[in-house]
Amino acid sequence: MKRKLLSGLLIISVLFISACQSNNRDSEKKSITVSILPQKYFVQSLIGDKLNINVMVAPGASPASYEPTPRQMAELTQSDLYLMMGHLGFEEAWIPRIEKTNPDLKIIDLSSGITLLGEESEEEHGADESDEHHHGVDPHIWMSPKQAKKIVQNTASALIKYEESCKDLILQKRDSLIGLIDDLDQRYSAAMDLIQNRKFIIFHPALTYLANDYQLEQIAMEFEGKEPSPSYFKSIVDRAKSENIGLLFIQKEFDIENAKQMAREIGAELIQIDPLDEDWFEQMEDILEKLKMLDKRAG
């Protein structure tokens, strides 16, 4: 299905692509840099292979704590444009340094215009009352179709300013891609409207925006990279049993053992997802199919 949808992008843009490519046919491609692999999907969907796309956070690494290699920092000097997702731990730690060492680098925050959600408090994760404090912004904005549409719009605007000769192509592909995401959004809404038990457990809280946008409840096992304390682990198990919560998600990059133990104790189905998948569209379709199982697993 996805191949058919993407082929539509190529057909619609055929009238504009020759003019866009002709300007750089005999020269090396320009380079831009993004933070995570799903952004590469959005950029390529908007401008094809016209640009080299450097991805800072390596496959399998955590965007919360990743440290770029010296080679990556050197390669960054070849980019004139950096598209940051907005509030990843990696970005908060490294963007100020990147700005300082690359003063001519244009940095665009793709979270602009998105209503940002806060992270949960430690109180909700079983911390002692004396340790309770609230944390900053949840960065996982790309994990909801509703928010992804704004990311696409912001990405397209940045690319048009960077590669003005491809404006018509980018606008056509932007509209087509947003149309595909609109359809995905409608399928999420229709499917979730049929769900009665709307709660799921997840190891790392990467589906905050998805849950908020489609009236689901995400119960996170992990908090700020920490595994659950024994008391909090037990509280989730007790809640899952009493509320018939039957789905437990874990991201591919995390150790699966704690999740396996919880899945056994509550009789839940353990499902791996990959929020950092380069094929964003396919991953979001896969998560939709998994969420449809919420009622089947309940009770």
Image: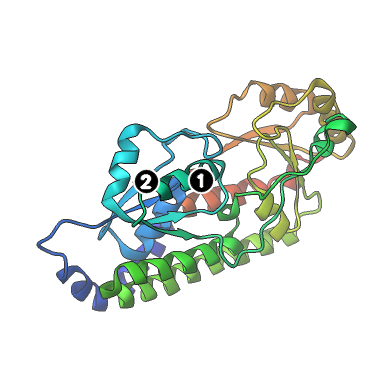
| Disc 2 element | helix
Q: Of the residues tagged 2 and 1, which is closer to the observer? A: 2
Residue type at mark 2 is Thr
Q: Which of 287 and 96 is in front in this view?
A: 96
User: Could you say which disc has been placed on residue 136 in the image?
Assistant: none
Identify the residue under disc 1.
Answer: 91
Q: Nearer the viewer, residue 189 or 255?
A: 255
Percent x, y for residue 276?
A: 50, 43
Amino acid, disc 1: Glu
Q: Which residue is drawn at 12% across and 60% down?
A: 27
Looking at the image, residue 268 lies above or below residue 31? above
Give the position of the C terminus as an image quadrant.
Answer: top right
Q: Position of residue 53 (x, y in %)?
A: 32, 51
Q: Earlier in the sequence, mark 2 or mark 1?
A: 1
Badge 1: few (under 14), some or many (20 or more) residues near its Cα, within 10 Å? many
Q: Where is residue 278 in the image (x, y as percent from the top left)?
A: 43, 47
Q: With 70 as the anchor, is 178 left or right in this view?
A: right
Q: Which of the 4 image quarters holds residue 115?
A: bottom right
**Residue labelled with disc 2:** 101
| Residue 13 visible (yes or no) | no
Where's the N terminus, which quadrant? Answer: bottom left
* SS type, badge 1: helix
Residue depicted at x 61% and y 25%: 256
Q: In which quarter of the image is residue 150?
A: bottom right
